[in-house]
Image (tube, rainbow, N blue to C red):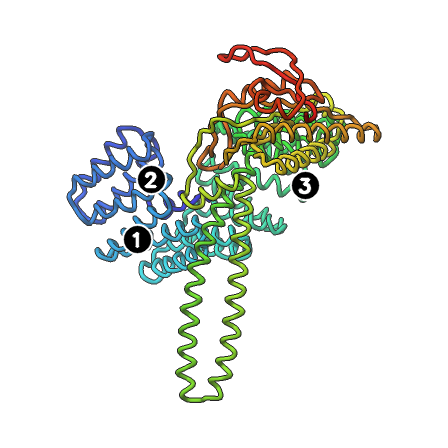
Amino acid sequence: MKIKLLFVLILFNSSSLLSNPNQSIEDSLQSAFLSAKIDSVQKNRLDDLANFYYSDSPKGPQECFDQLKKVIEQKKDAKLEYMLLLYRVVLLHTQDSIIETRKYLNQFLEQCLKYDDKKQYANGLIMLSNSSRYAGNYNEALKLMLLALDYARDTLKDKKMIGEVYLTLAVFHYEQQDTLKAIEFNKMALKEMTDLNHLSNMASVCNNLAMQYSDLAKYDSAEFYFRESIRLFHLQFEEPNLRNPLMNLAEVFRLTHQYDSAILYTRNAIHNAIKIKDTEIIGFAYWQIAKIFKDIGKSDSALKYFELANEEIERNVPENARIYFYPELAGFFASIGNHKEAYFYLKKAISIKETVFNAENNKVLKEMDIKYQTSQKEKELLKQEEQIKRQRILTYSMIAIAAFFLLLVFFIYRSYRLKRKANELITYEKKRSDDLLLNILPSEVAEELKEKGSAEAKHFDQVTVMFTDFKNFTQISEKLSPSELVAEIHTCFKAFDTIITKHNIEKIKTIGDAYMCAGGLPIANKTHAIDVVYAALEIQQFIQEHLEQRKKENKEPFEIRIGIHTGPVVAGIVGVKKFAYDIWGDTVNIASRMESSGEAGKVNISGSTYELVKNKFNCIFRGKIPAKNKGEIDMYFANNKV
């Protein structure tokens, strides 16, 4: 469950006016708020208007907030204006930083205490808890949510809020992989929703319970709650919400080998998706049926539905959501002997997985930094606690000297172990964080990023860029198994990494079977061209030896082309969610042309590189090639040292 959904679930009471949002409804909601006189009615109408802007307005978040602020200010009521702090968090939390979000929430809580608004104070605690959870501080988040529960249960006696807090606590524990505790809180939430006869919320909680029982392989309980969820959604005529319990129940039947029931409920999900025009779920439903036919050994039927699933998923499902589909599709094609298709979809899976992995790397970096900062604060608290304990021991020593020495030895020893353990943990986590950062970025760029929080792009007047590419890679790869192909590429690229590191060259990236690196950055030097040519010759030597070895083993040989060019580039980090160190400029394009215009087993360098290395290497002129906006460029084959 997304954090923003938790915010709105607890904050607003939806109005029946919101079933068909448009400009006239916005005007009606504004009029209803402005004409309300009683405080409680004003706040309810304000909630209706804010919920409209959050859920149904076609306007952007900032425009919605500005319009809401304008309407509230017309009332000239300080008791209403402080609500803007809360609405800002709800409407603009995707734009604000976590620090800003927490600042506005703390200001809102202060105003709630000032105006004795207990219900909104509880809402503020819930949202502050969610903010802590999002920042990775689960201990603080849990304390705040339990405090909100006390308010809802003991002060407000608000069963709806109690149920929603139980539901949020279930989410907390589920995210911490404590499924049994999540089930316990979901059942408590279900009881509160049942007492209120909130059928829609009951249906959602039943679906959550079923999913958690399914995780524990308690399929009888999972089936019961999925059926209950479907029944309750039917009673509410909530067709869009049926898709998840229908698909999940079908999966339970597949896992318990009730294949006829699995197909029946999957087809029900398809009919429901067609009815509500939910194109995304149709592809996953076809995938579900394909898995069922695969399980029972009907390969022809499985192939038919895998192809239907692939067509729908590629048309309607975002690329990052296909990460689990393509490997299974590749595995299926491999199982029926169609290795060409298996390899094709395995490559697609690897491509998507690499993208997702890079995103996860950035997420891990952020979480590690947050945890490190938190650990520093906890360390200070530990020191304060130790000081208090020591003072208490000194006080007790006035009563019993003997006991004092025993306790002193005990606490000093325990303090030493705690500090040593804490220091070891901090050192270990910091090393992990630094190693991960250095594996992604050059050390100089990583240090700048840690010190300033950002790294500026830099122009380099002269660097030498090298491209490598395997000859006839596509044809050769079709003759190899996926695992053999990946192992071969890994062997070569690992050797390339070792060689360029020895020559002080920066690896930029790999693109499929192509390898790109550059000398003379991120720290400029005058030997970059010589360094890169040395490395290129070593790479060709390695490939030649490796080729001979593969021929002896009767394996497909790999040959490589290498192209090198020297010129200016711009280098830096791109993206805010995924760090990647890269270079840009005509120099990169010309280096790529040098590679594609070269020959296998040769190092093809441009005229600009030749001028820098001609006194170090024997070079053979081999003609010119045209380059866009550059005229014709000389090419040379670089050989052994002079």
Mark before the other along the chain sequence, 2 or 3: 2
Q: Which residue is mark 3?
A: 258
Secondary structure at numbered mark 1: helix
Measuring from the top left, give residue 8's x and y in whole percent.
36, 44
Q: Quadrant of residue 319?
A: top right
Measuring from the top left, give residue 429's x and y in whole percent.
53, 54
Q: Which residue is mark 1?
A: 106
Label 1 is placed on what type of residue? Answer: Asn
Residue 282 vs residue 275, the one in the foreground:
282
Marking on residue 234: none
Label 3 is placed on what type of residue? Answer: Gln
Label 2 is placed on what type of residue? Answer: Leu
Asked if one can make out residue 270 in the rendered structure from this viewpoint, the answer is no
Q: Which residue is mark 2?
A: 92
Asked if one can make out residue 3 in the rendered structure from this viewpoint, the answer is yes
Q: CA distance from mark 2 to mark 1?
A: 16 Å
Q: Quadrant of residue 545?
A: top right
Callout 2–callout 3 Cβ contact below 8 Å:
no
Secondary structure at numbered mark 3: loop
Mark before the other along the chain sequence, 2 or 1: 2
